[in-house]
Amino acid sequence: MVKKHIRYFGFLFMFSYLIITCSENPNVAVSEFGKYRGFSEEKYDSWQRTSQYLTMDDGVKLAMDIIRPVKNNQVVSDALPVVWAYYRYHRAVERDGKILSLVDRLPSLQTLIKHGYVIVVADARGTGASYGYESKGANTLQEAQHTYQITEWIASQAWCDGNVGMFGHSYSGNMQFLAAAQAPSHLKAVFPSGPTFDLYEIIYPGGIFSENIAKSIRNSVHYWDIEADTVPVDSDSNALLLKKARSEHRNNADPFEFFRALPYRDSRYKEYTFWLQGNPMVYLSACNVSRIPVYQWIGWKDFLIKDALQWFVNLDGPQKLSIGWWSHNITSSYKLLSIEQLRWFDYWLKGIQNGIMDEPPIHYIWIDDPDSTIWHQAQTWPLPEAESKDYYFFRQASADGQAGYHGLLSANKGLKEDERQNIRFPASGELTFTTPPLEKNLFVIGHPVVTLNLTTTARDVDLYVSLQDVDDSDSLHQVSKGVLRASHRKESEPPFDNMGLPFYRHFKEDVSPVPTGQPVKLTFDLLPTAKVIQRGQHIRVTVACANAVWGELTEETPAPVVMLHQNSQMQSGISLPILKER
């Protein structure tokens, strides 16, 4: 019997050794998440850039960079697959007298070039060296049609073998869904990172105008469209065409003023209902008809993380989703991105059977996990093994008009059937509720949902909720956040799969003031997360309140009264998605 066990464990050791040895052996082909060799050969050592104008069907000329692989100082003559981007932030720039293409600036594109792909980058309409302007914001039908025309033009060129893909981040990520909705016959796959699904909830989260985001967008596009120098196309040696194109950019809509004029989802701008016509999610149905394969790249700390998950649960075609540690700035993920992008396009554009579609569609990492280098896999979202755990807000200390209110966050309802607590917001407009130290690591993964039962003497209030973890030194780390304007509290049926979360239509007719002194219930989700809150730390929920009309509560005299309620009929608290197997 002992000999049998020895032979068994010896076999396991040898089998494990062989697996490890094969995976590390450079002569053995490997294709798995974050690892790739032996399937695709790095044939080329450099690249060459040329540029030109391409005239769209509406007469607008767009500036294009074509970047082709080079070996031994010779441009490849073979027709190759092409990946391209509809780009808003200058396809090429000049630094220290040298013109740098997007390939020169992005290591992930250099990986593609060296493995035998042509890269094309188009300055978007009204940007860079392209002509035209956008008076209707972004994501317009004209731009969508441009992506179709460019894709089919690329496929017709001698340097293209007819297989076309798209890449790009943020704005360029959005444009890939617009392109997929047009169903170009040669578009075989896309790889969007940091895309938007519901732009209204980014500019008006919970119905509250996000001035900071709108101003940031305004400053960014003004810099790139007006101030920053750009590079003319090759034939424009005296830059006269570039100068003319740049003059047209001054007619681009001011994003701040444009968005500020559209407070409701059904608001119109010159008879154009932007949120219902220019919002990326309006292209969902057409994307599901085309079924063009989609690989999304996003980080838990990206403010667009929910948008990526909304795309994922609503798309019908082949797809993958990777969620890492990064924010909207994906620079730290470039090495991993290079590998996954190459695996994706090798499969869909070159037909290399590398097994990428045999893997589970979701790869994700935990934030602050002691085993933080481990990537996990999932088939669906939300994770079926996560279950909701309710925590309730309780009074614990007297309100301090200066320092705020420090209450208890408890998984125990704690109140008898006839007992009630009314918790008044202090002058600071902020309440905090904190758990005792955790007895074991808590794995929070999914969408936290907060419920606030409140009364107020104000006609409207804005509620800001933050989920945090707190260590022994009272150092805070943000886990998630969410907001809702009380007058936008009417829930509606979502026109898409909203993962069972509360949905607010935000139409003008849905908005109503808060009845004075009468309880109202506000239920809304916070940004999704995958966070390990470690043993000995505390969970904290901060609820901040501001008057929706006058700003901070203290600016009115007397300040309006706002109270949270906790009793058997009205419970205020937060529901956390907890991984039950950890």
Image (cartoon, rainbow, N blue to C red):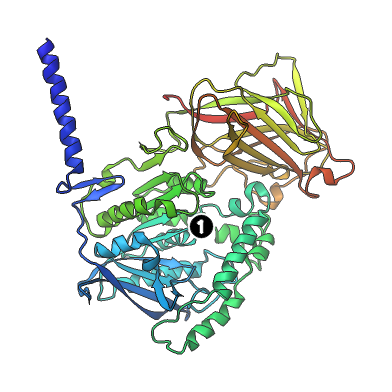
Q: Quadrant of residue 415?
A: top right
In this rendering, the answer to whether 58 lies above or below 508 is below
Q: Quadrant of residue 40?
A: bottom left
Q: Position of residue 97 (x, y in %)?
A: 43, 79
In this rendering, the answer to whether 483 lies above or below 567 is below
Q: Name the residue beneath numbered marker 1.
A: 280
Q: Nearer the viewer, residue 521 or 17?
A: 17
In this rendering, the answer to whether 389 lies above or below 503 is above
Q: Amino acid at mark 1?
A: Pro
Q: Quadrant of the N terminus?
A: top left
Q: Nearer the viewer, residue 189 or 225?
A: 225
In this rendering, the answer to whether 194 lies above or below 514 is below
Q: Residue at x 80, y 43 (%)?
A: 553
Q: Nearer the viewer, residue 168 or 266?
A: 168
Q: Position of residue 166 (x, y in %)?
A: 37, 62
Q: Residue at x 59, y 58 (%)?
A: 275
Q: In screen coordinates, is 24 left or right of 229?
A: left
